[in-house]
Image: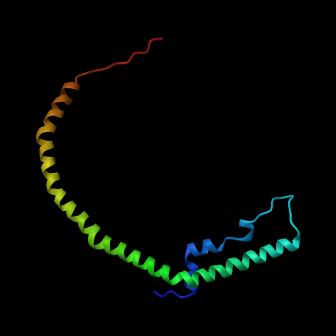
């Protein structure tokens, strides 16, 4: 799976960050407008600065951040594959034996008790009368 310059367009995060427009940041309310020349200069300055600072920050921090995030996700994957999943599976294997003993205890001691209590209370009848 190759990652070219065109494939980065498919990443949603990059697309969301790229959709911030001048009007989203600096919006004049209705009835309040600056001079057209100032508005156009502000728009051009904003657009150019956003474009070039993004490129500058990407050039400076892109590779180091890719290394940091690559190491982070490698460690996370390693821990998940070699530590978390084996611990959970061994716990489930060990708890299976305990659950069988617990199940036998419940069926031996609690089932007869609750069955007897259920038979005692099964003969109770309640009626509700509505008097007008």
Q: Nearer the viewer, residue 81 or 46?
A: 46
The structure residue drawn at horizontal position 83% and vertical position 71%, both measured from the top left corner, is 39
Where residue 110 appears, as percent x and y from the top left, is 15, 38
The structure residue drawn at horizontal position 57% and vertical position 87%, both measured from the top left corner, is 5
Q: Quadrant of residue 60?
A: bottom right
Color encoding of the figure: rainbow
Where residue 120 appears, as percent x and y from the top left, is 19, 25
Horizontal relation, residue 38 to residue 108: left or right: right
Q: Quadrant of residue 15?
A: bottom right
Horizontal relation, residue 84 to residue 3: left or right: left
The structure residue drawn at horizontal position 11% and vertical position 41%, both measured from the top left corner, is 108
The structure residue drawn at horizontal position 25% and vertical position 63%, both measured from the top left corner, is 88
Where residue 14 appears, as percent x and y from the top left, is 58, 75
- With respect to residue 108, does 25 lie above or below? below
- With respect to residue 72, does 2 lie above or below? below
Q: Quadrant of residue 34?
A: bottom right
As drawn, the residue found furthest toward the front would be: 60
Query: Considering the image in quadrants, where does the N terminus appear?
Result: bottom left
- With respect to residue 88, does 111 lie above or below? above
Q: Nearer the viewer, residue 60 or 25?
A: 60
Q: Nearer the viewer, residue 80 or 59?
A: 59
- With respect to residue 58, does 105 lie above or below? above
Count of numbered labels shown in the rendering: 0
Where residue 121 appears, as percent x and y from the top left, is 22, 25
């Amino acid at each position: 799976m190759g990652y070219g310059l065109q494939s980065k367009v498919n990443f949603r995060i990059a697309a969301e960050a790229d959709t911030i427009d001048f009007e989203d940041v600096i919006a004049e309310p209705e009835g309040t407008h600056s001079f057209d020349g100032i508005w156009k200069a502000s728009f051009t300055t904003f657009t150019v600065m956003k474009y070039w600072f993004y490129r500058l920050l990407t050039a400076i921090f892109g590779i180091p951040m890719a290394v940091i995030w690559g190491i982070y996700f490698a460690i996370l994957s390693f821990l998940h594959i070699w530590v978390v999943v084996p611990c959970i599976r061994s716990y489930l294997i060990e708890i299976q034996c305990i659950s069988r003993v617990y199940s036998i205890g419940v069926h031996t001691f609690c089932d007869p008790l609750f069955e007897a209590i259920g038979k005692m209370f099964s003969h109770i009848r309640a009626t509700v009368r509505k008097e007008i």
